[in-house]
Image (tube, rainbow, N blue to C red):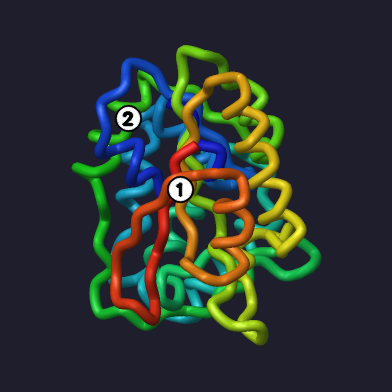
Amino acid sequence: MIEPFVGAGSVFLNTDFSRYILADINSDLIGLYNIVKLRTDEYVAAAREMFTPENNVAERYYLYRDEFNQSQDPLRRAVLFLYLNRHGYNGLCRYNLRGEFNVPFGRYKKPYFPEAELYHFAEKAQNAEFYCESYEECMQRADSRTVVYCDPPYAPLTATANFTAYHTNSFNLEQQVLLAQKAESLMKKRIPVLISNHRTPLTQEWYKKRGRNAYCEGAAQHQQQRWYA
């Protein structure tokens, strides 16, 4: 299976394909995944040391955030990335226009260290390849033996809503249309594609005119829709 928007990897972790190609434009996320895959014990030990009461204070958080934004060491960045994700506000991953992580301190009583989940991920990751690349580049890897699942940043529910930009590259309406066109090009090669998105007039137009099947889930005012190509 190919996932051009792997994100948190929930589909990857809850399916059982023999091989995975997983991509994201966030280099920190892909760096973390590769470190966990290849240096599991070393990573878990280093990350565990960050989850202490002494490190769960705002002053220490902002020191580590500054270190993360300056560090070039792949292991240290991966350790700090998990720390910031678990100690930052609402688990957000957000960057400023300079590409600096800028999520504020979250003030949680006791952030959870996901040790068992890291080992489970590492085991699954032995059958996966991780790439920091665009969805277009990732989808070019598809062939007749693969299925492609796309879970992009969702289209806004209203004209005034904003896309969630968790990396410095935002996913705008033009990108949504290009994704639909790319899915159509794979379909013509008989490569199955599944895409999740909000159900809006625009998404209905993008996919229905291409003759795609769909099903919905969720409340009517916040429905998510998946299209099969």
Residue 207 at x, y percent in the picture: 57, 51
* Residue 35 position (above or below residue 78): above
What residue appears at the point 50 percent right and 44 percent down from the top-left corner? 212
Say whether disc 1 or disc 2 marks the residue closer to the N-terminus.
2
Q: In the image, 28: left or right of 15? A: right
Looking at the rendered structure, the number of numbered marks drawn on it comes to 2
Q: Relative to residue 212, is residue 91 drawn left or right?
A: left
Q: In the picture provided, is 144 more to the left or to the right than 141?
A: left
Q: Which residue is mark 2?
A: 122
**Residue furthest out toward the right:** 98
Query: Is any atom of residue 38 visible in this view?
Result: no
Horizontal and vertical percent for residue 221? 39, 81
Q: Residues within 10 Å of mark 2 (few under 14, many from 20)?
A: many
7 relative position to 175: left or right? left
Residue closest to the far bottom: 160
**What residue is rendered at 49% in x and 34% in y?**
193
Q: Which residue appears farthest toward the left when viewing the image?
A: 116
17 lies above or below 160: above
Which residue is found at the position 48% from the left and 66% from the top?
198
Residue named by callout 1: 227
What is the crowding at mark 1: few (fewer than 14 residues within 10 Å), some, or many (at least 20)?
many
Residue for point 40% across, 64% down: 224
Cα distance, mark 1 to mark 2?
30 Å
The answer to whether residue 156 is visible is yes
> Which residue is more in the foreground, 216 or 109?
216
Residue 103 figure quarter? bottom right
